[in-house]
Amino acid sequence: MKKFVTIGIIIAILINSAAAYAETFTIALFDLSGSVLTDSTGSDSKESPFSRNMAELKNEINKLGKNDTIIVIGFGRKSSVTLLKATMPRQSGAGNQNLILTRKAAFKKFEENLASRSKSIDGTRTDVIGSLLRVSRFIEESNLPEGTQRRIIIFSDMVDNETLGMSFKRISKNSKCVTESIEKRNLEYPNLKGVDVIIYSAFSDVKGVSTVDTELAIKNLKAFWIGYFSKCGSAVKLYKTNY
């Protein structure tokens, strides 16, 4: 009996160890619509949503482990562009130097591609839903090895005014109206079963919206997206409002 118990413990340890070191496949959606590119004064200062998203993305890249893959997709209205595709080395090297240098090179490449490719994006509106449908197809067609941890990280104000007709004023009153618009249009939920979701919702002061309405909008926006991803079969592991 003790022999079987010992074997069971060893198997459990091996399973937990494999899970702890499971490679991750991350798709990051980086909002390039006009609403996040500047702050309320029209500048591109460190306080702008865009700058905060850049900082959060850099932090996420610096968390990548051995053999992890990240793909960063810039999106706006009915358009998207790949800004980075990078895989971390299998060997981290002495003092993690291989890993550290690869992370730095990845973020630098992202910045270069952002400067050269972002002009192709229609930034007049934000299409989160359309981007998620595209990402779900991409994940399904990627044929990832069993055990790969799949993640989506979104850097956006999360105000989808292209597909859902969102606005801070509208959602501050009632988030149910957005859910009803999905049902009326019979929009399909993307298949994101088993995918972990991280959201960085960055925005600046919204003209014509009071502090009370802003806070209500933040609360309703967060509740809506957590519910939405639940219907997609995924879980929101982190929802951080950068405001």
Image (tube, helix red, strand yellow):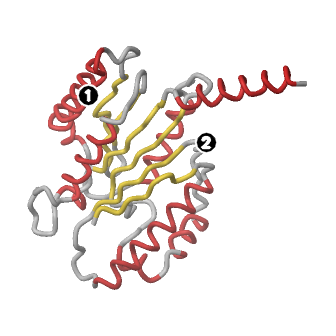
The residue sitting at 10% across, 68% down in the picture is: 41
Q: What's the amino acid at mark 2?
A: Gly
Residue furthest toward the right?
1
The residue sitting at 59% across, 27% down in the picture is: 17
Residue 86, position as x, y percentages in the image: 34, 25
* Res 106 label: 1
Q: For numbered disc 2, what is the local secondary structure? A: loop
Q: Quadrant of residue 210?
A: bottom left
Residue 175, position as x, y percentages in the image: 50, 75
Q: For numbered disc 1, what is the local secondary structure? A: helix
Q: What's the amino acid at mark 1?
A: Ala
Q: In this view, does 187 lie above or below 64?
A: below
Which of these two is toward me, 225 or 129? 225
Residue 118, position as x, y percentages in the image: 21, 41
Q: Is residue 91 above or below residue 82?
A: above
Q: In this view, does 9 lie to the left or right of 24?
A: right
Using a 10 Å C-alpha cutoff, classify the residue at mark 1 as few (fewer than 14 neighbours), some (14 to 19) or many (20 or more): many
Q: In this view, does 225 lie above or below 104?
A: below
Residue under pointer 2: 194
